[in-house]
Structure formats: structure tokens, C-alpha cells
Image (spheres, helix red, strand yellow):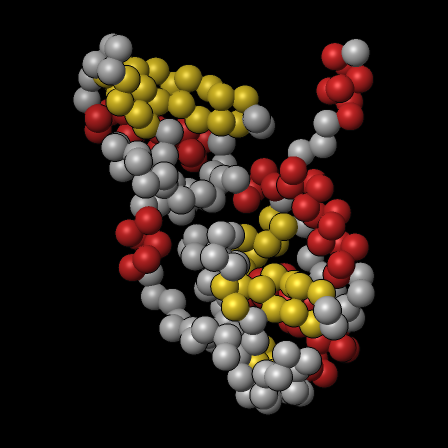
């Protein structure tokens, strides 16, 4: 019974990708360019035709989802994520896999800030959790041992890199592991670092 349950379980990201592809099959490259214009320098989409929700020509399309943080644009009754629309607009086809915001800002849809990645690659470019006390992802203060505990997750398996008395040694161990296992150079960046990166100011959809 347990084996059957394991075989039936599907990761949430795979379910999301399947739903996205079913929705995306309804929108062609030609249709997208008929209704929207994409500015590669600031990442915004603007309407070329009056939208069903009374948006006027020239207005910035869509709005930012208050939970997920992505800009969502409605076309033909379907909702699409702007960063995936950017790939369709620029390449003529939908991305086969996931799209990563290189600097970690989900609202920054400039073409230079987007790259197509696998789920594994996407998880190797994550921001630092706000409750992290060390300043680096994977480095935690272990109260029981009064030492800095260092871990890294590779291929879904958590590897223990050791416990260190000095925080600097712990951080160095994690940075070396990031290089060894091919994590993106932005992986584990602080939220402040993301917020301080140069990104365009985008008006809310009007």
C-alpha cells in the first residue's frame, strides 16, 4: 500500500508545470504580439489593443499577485505569468521548463534577468530566509551544541557539512560546497541585496 502511495505522489512543481502548459497551449506567439508589446529594458508589457477589462492602449498589463509576487496578465480569459510570456514573446515558443529571475526579484521581468532552468537549477538560486541569523543559506546556529551547523541540499538529499565554532569557518564551508555542487552565485543572497539591485520601477496595472 505504501509503495502505491509513493508511486502516485507527484511533486507540486510538476503539477503546476502541467497546468501551465495546458493553459499556455491556448496562446500563440502571433496572438501575444497582436495584443501586447514587451519592453526588454524594463520588463513591462503594455496593451496594443483595448483589453476586455477596459484597459486602454498603452497601459501596463497585469498586476502583481499578492501571495506569489509574480506579475499576472489575463489574455482571452486565461491568466499567464509575465516572465513566461516574455519567453514566448522573445523566442517564439513557450519555455519547456521553469523560468528563473536571476536577481531573485519576481517583479523584475527584464529580458536580461530571465533564464530558462530546470527545477533543480531553480532551487539553486534561492534568496536567504528572513529569519536566518548567519547571513548565508544553509548556516544555522545550533543551540544544543553552541556551534554553527552547516548543511546543503543536493538532489533532494540534505548533506551535513559539519559544526563550527567560528561563524566565518562555517560560512566558508558552505560557500565551498556551493561551488562544488554548482549552485548559482546569487544563491543564498540576502533580501536586502535583492532589494538593492538595480531594477526598473514598474507602475501597477491600471
151 w.r.t. 114: above or below: above
- Rendering coords of residue 74 (x, y %): 65, 69
Q: Quadrant of the N terminus?
A: top right
- Rendering coords of residue 14 (x, y %): 70, 40
Between residues 49 and 128, which one lies in front from this camera angle? Answer: 49
- Rendering coords of residue 130 (x, y %): 32, 41
7 w.r.t. 70: above or below: above
130 w.r.t. 180: above or below: below
Name which residue lies at 63% across and 50% down: 98
Which residue lies most toward the front here?
Answer: 53
Between residues 44 and 167, which one lies in front from this camera angle? Answer: 44
- Does residue 127 appear to the left or right of 86 in the view shown? left
Name which residue lies at 21% across and 14% down: 146
Q: Looking at the image, can residue 112 be seen?
A: no
Between residues 56 and 93, which one lies in front from this camera angle? Answer: 56
12 w.r.t. 147: above or below: below
Q: How many numbered circles are shown? A: 0
Q: Looking at the image, can residue 148 be seen?
A: yes
Name which residue lies at 68% across and 80% down: 52
- Rendering coords of residue 120 (x, y %): 58, 38
Name which residue lies at 51% across and 52% down: 68
- Does residue 71 appear to the left or right of 19 in the view shown? left
**Picture quarter containing residue 128?**
top left
- Does residue 204 appear to the left or right of 28 in the view shown? left
Amino acid at each position: 500500500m505504501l509503495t502505491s502511495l509513493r508511486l502516485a505522489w507527484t511533486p507540486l512543481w510538476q503539477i503546476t508545470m502541467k497546468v501551465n502548459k495546458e493553459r499556455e497551449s491556448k496562446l500563440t506567439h502571433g496572438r501575444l504580439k497582436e495584443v501586447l508589446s514587451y519592453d526588454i529594458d524594463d520588463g513591462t508589457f503594455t496593451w496594443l489593443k483595448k483589453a476586455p477589462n477596459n484597459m486602454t492602449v498603452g497601459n501596463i498589463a497585469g498586476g502583481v499577485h499578492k501571495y506569489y509576487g509574480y506579475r499576472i496578465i489575463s489574455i482571452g480569459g486565461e491568466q499567464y505569468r509575465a516572465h513566461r510570456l516574455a519567453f514566448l514573446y522573445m523566442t517564439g515558443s513557450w519555455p519547456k521548463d521553469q523560468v528563473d529571475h536571476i536577481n531573485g526579484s519576481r517583479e523584475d521581468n527584464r529580458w536580461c534577468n530571465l533564464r530558462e532552468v530546470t527545477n533543480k537549477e531553480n532551487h539553486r538560486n534561492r534568496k536567504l530566509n528572513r529569519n536566518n541569523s548567519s547571513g548565508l543559506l544553509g548556516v544555522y546556529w545550533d543551540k544544543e551544541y553552541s556551534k554553527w551547523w552547516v548543511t546543503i541540499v543536493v538532489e533532494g538529499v540534505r548533506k551535513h557539512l559539519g559544526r563550527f565554532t567560528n561563524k566565518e569557518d562555517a560560512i566558508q564551508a558552505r560557500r565551498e560546497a556551493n561551488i562544488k555542487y554548482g549552485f548559482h552565485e546569487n544563491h543564498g543572497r540576502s533580501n536586502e541585496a535583492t532589494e538593492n539591485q538595480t531594477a526598473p520601477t514598474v507602475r501597477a496595472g491600471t
